[in-house]
Amino acid sequence: MPRRIANALTLVSAVVCVLSAMGVGRSFFCGYQVWTQGQIQASVAVIDGLLINSTYVSDVGVTSWGGSMAIDAAALRPKTSAMLRRISLVPWLGLGFNFAGGSGAVGSPSITEVILPLWLLPLLTAIAPVRGWRKRRREARRGFPVAAT
């Protein structure tokens, strides 16, 4: 029974790996953005293999609303490039963050911006299928059994 569970989990991991790798590739051509407005304004964008999360907390009450859109990545790049320049970014990893607390004055927002690489999910979900494949390769013996007569 544990072997069947391990095989099922390995298969699920392989499917998630392939689908997330396709999502990373698609993010270079089609960008996605989801946002909410109100006292807490949040935005999540997926573009160029990056997941960009922005949260602005203000003490000024605003009517809440939100939305989402899928647009061409070329149209979304200029909006995100300004944020990418001001955030402490490790370019070769695709990591960045910005935590700016409000000054305490009325209308002074607290800002949190985090950038995570999308390539991390396919990499992590590929571990189980690769380990299973390597284990099967090691257990399999090459050639035919030869018996001494």
Image: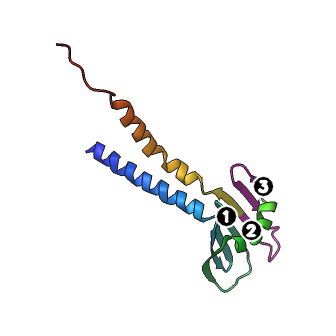
Q: Position of residue 37 (x, y in %)?
A: 66, 80
Q: Residue at x 32, y 28 (%)?
A: 141
Q: Secondary structure at mark 1?
A: strand
Q: CA distance from mark 1 to mark 2?
A: 9 Å
**Disc ID at residue 126:** none
Mark 2: give few (<14), some (14-19) or many (20+) Cα within 10 Å. few
Pick the quarter of the image with the N terminus: top left
What residue span does the magenta drawing correspond to?
89-112
Asked whether residue 57 appears in the rendered view, the answer is no
Residue 116 in view (yes/no) = yes
Quickly name the residue at label 1: 52
For marks 1 and 3 on the same chain, the one whose residue lies earlier in the sequence? 1
Q: Is residue 108 magenta?
A: yes
Identify the element where label 3 is drawn. Answer: strand
Q: Is residue 4 left or right of residue 30?
A: left
Q: Residue furthest left?
A: 149
Instruction: Specify the quadrant of the image occupied by residue 51.
Output: bottom right
Identify the residue shown where x is 31% and y is 27%: 143
Percent coordinates x, y for residue 60 in the rendering: 74, 80
Mark with earlier residue (1, 2):
1
Residue 61 locus on image (x, y percent): 70, 82
Circles 1 and 2 in contact, beta carbons < 8 Å:
yes
Quarter of image, res 66: bottom right
The secondary structure type at the circle numbered 2 is helix
Q: Residues within 10 Å of mark 1 (few under 14, many from 20)?
A: many
Whichever of labels 2 and 3 marks the residue nearer the N terminus, that label is 2
Mark-to-mark CA distance, 2 and 3:
14 Å
Identify the amino acid type marked 2: Thr
Q: Is residue 6 above or below residue 59?
A: above
For label 3, the residue is: 88
Query: What residue is disc 2 on?
Result: 80
Residues at discs 1 and 3 in contact (Cβ within 8 Å): no
